[in-house]
Each structure stands twice: as C-alpha cells, then as structure tokens.
Image (cartoon, rainbow, N blue to C red):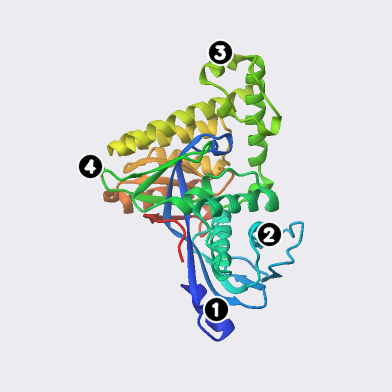
Amino acid sequence: MKCEEVYKEFYHRDPENLTFCPYRICPLGAHIDHQYGKINGLAIDKGIYLAYSPKQNGVVELQSLNFPKRAQFHVNSVPEEKVGDWADHLRGATKMLAEKYHLRIGLSAVIEGTLPIGGLSSSAAVIIVFLTTLARVNHIELTEWELILMAKAAENRYVGVNCGKLDQSCEVLCRKDSLLYLDCKDDSYELIPKSSNMPPFKIGIFFSGLERSLANSAYNLRQDECKVAAYDLLAYAGLPYGKYEDTRLRDVPTTVFEEYKDRLPKALLRRATHYFGEYARAEEGAAAWREGNLSAYGELVFASGRSSIDNYECGCPELITLYEILSQTPGIYGGRFSGAGFKGCCMALIDPAYEEEVLRSVEREYLAVYPLLEGKYLGTLCDSADGVKI
C-alpha cells in the first residue's frame, strides 16, 4: 500500500503493522438504523489502511494521503471541542477510548483511503481503523460491540453527526459472502451466507464526482422529522410516550401508522412511509438472500432507492440521475444511493457477465448529462469482504 511507502519515506523505517477497515454498502434498510429499524449490509474489499508504529511518549502523529494538514495530539489531552478538520474523527475516537481505558501509548501513522469520499461510510471507517489500532498499541482488547459503540459515540458526541450504528456494525461484523442482517433496536444480528444457488455478482460503486459532509447536510434534519412523526403518531393513538429525544418510529406499531398516518403533515408522512416500507424491504431482502433469489433482492434494492427519492427526499440531481441510469441498465440486479444520498455515490449488484458493458454504459450516459464531471466521476467494481482487521 502507498501508506506503507510514505511511512518509510517520512520515518526512514518500515511501519510495525498495518490495519484495514473496509467501506460498507447498505442495500436495504437505508435511513432507518437511527429509528431502530432493521438493515442489510455488506463490507467491501476497498477501504481505509493505516500503516503505524507505537509511540511510547503518548503522542499521536498521523498524516493522511487524502487530506492536507498532519494531525498531532497527546492521547491524554484531546481538545474538549472539535477543531473542524478531518482529524476530529481521530480525536473523538481517542476521547471515547480514554473514557473507559487508561491510555499511555500513542502512534505514528499514515492513513490512506482507497476510494473517493462519499457514500461508503469513510468517516466511520477512519474512526474504526484508528480506534482498533490505538487500542492495540495500548494492549486493550475491545469486543466487537465495544468497538462499534465507541466509534458511533465518536461521531455522535464529538464530530456532531447523529448517525445510527449501521456503518460501524457493517465495518466490524461483516464477513465475506455473507449478508449482515441487523436489528438496530436490540443489536441482534445474523450473518446470512451466500446461498449455493445464488448467481455470481459483483458490487458496483459509482461516484457522482461530488463530495459531501453529513454534518452540513439535511442528514440530521431527516432524523428529527422521523422522531416528530413517531411522537405525533403515538400521541394520536393515545399510546404512552416519553421524551422526544428517546422516541423512534420503531416504537410505533404498523397498525397505528396505518390508522393515523393521514393526520401527519405531508413531509412527516413521507418520512414515516419510507421507514415502514424500508423496514419491510429489509425483512423481505433477508428472506430473498437466504433463498439465493438475487433478482427479487435487486428489485427490493431499486424500490428502496425510489423511496429514498420520493419519501425520504434525499439525493442531489447528480445521484438521482445515476440511480435512474442504473435502473435502466441491463445486467444490474438492483441499485440505489449508498449512504445518506446527499451527494456521494450509488451502489449496484451486477451480473459479472455484463460488468464491462455496465461500467461503459453508465459512464457514457452519466457524463452525457454532466460533462463537467469527467475526470471526477468514477465507476469501479468490488467484492464483499470481512470486517476490520490488523
């Protein structure tokens, strides 16, 4: 990896080790993890690499091949408030780890992302790859769920993004050729192996050429709208409810939604409609995957993408264009936005027999609409992968 080469050039020695955290895709269960819904997820064989060596003086010294400005801080003196740069993810991770464990060893490192930023949970991958490494050098053995929840807390409490646990769970729990089927309410999950009768597939990633920051998008607003919808529905039905911040659409029975949905303002109705539809699609998708029915699974993924546009109302014009192109391209089982949908990329499950034709066709049609994005747009193919590892 290039990060190993840069490390050697900078420090005049080889790094002691290398940590890898994959990016993830969420074919089904989009935008409902924070409402305690159910999700389907896959890790991919592209992600974040961290070449590192321990530093006994407790200093973290880390440079990125994707961002300017080297990060430097002590493990026991992280700023209380975020600084406003990419390294806030590292500071947040350090702070969360230090709340539970004593830290005394830092690290020197070079970090490298293997795909453009946007839609593949690169922020979660940066946190997880760093958190895993910092724990390792301090001789701390984190359980999978400690790692997931600490990484989530770093984004929620330090960086300021109110994400659920979808990203972190995929990047830690996933295994190659198995679908992660996770219930975000009680954290129960199943790894559903690829059925022997499932046709082969590749994972296509199609970058719009645009980048985005969730903290500056409508991501947090959509969560608030979902919670207001849940609060209203419970009140209409005369059901008990607690604090607003603790309310989720998972608390609302489907029968209550059907009975009282017409009382909701139009925007809140659309958010709730997406939640209940996506919850059902995640359940149906797990069943289709278990049966090896990739065609049925793909249709659910396309339906999820349509609901994200019409009901969740996310997606910039470029991503909506990409989705429409994917939905009309032969050889694609299913596709949708990857991530929040406010810029970034789309993902698709592709028949390998059509892979070259799909890559050429999607690029040609997309750049015909957005010619100024030539050189920034990228289409690439991936396979599924295991979660984070040293």
Tag 4 residue = 197
Q: Label 1 vs label 3: CA separation?
A: 61 Å
Residue type at numbered disc 1 = Tyr
Q: Nearer the viewer, residue 292 or 334?
A: 292
Q: Which residue shows up at 66% across the image and 21% down it? A: 232
Near mark 4 (Cα within 10 A), the count class, few <14, some 14-19 or many ≥20, is few
Residue type at numbered disc 2 = Lys
Q: Label 1 vs label 2: CA separation?
A: 25 Å
Q: Earlier in the sequence, mark 1 or mark 3?
A: 1
Which mark's residue is nearer the viewer, 4 or 2?
2
Number of the label disc, if any, that sits on residue 95? 2
Instruction: Label 1: state its secondary structure.
Output: helix
Q: Which residue shows up at 62% across the image and 77% down it? A: 55
Q: Which residue shows up at 55% across the image and 29% down it? A: 250
Q: Label 4 vs label 1: CA separation?
A: 45 Å
**Residue 338, x across and y down, in percent:** 50, 45
Tell me: 157 left or right of 135: right
Tell me: 311 left or right of 389: right
Label 4–label 1 contact, CB within 8 A: no
Tag 3 residue = 259
Label 3–label 2 contact, CB within 8 A: no
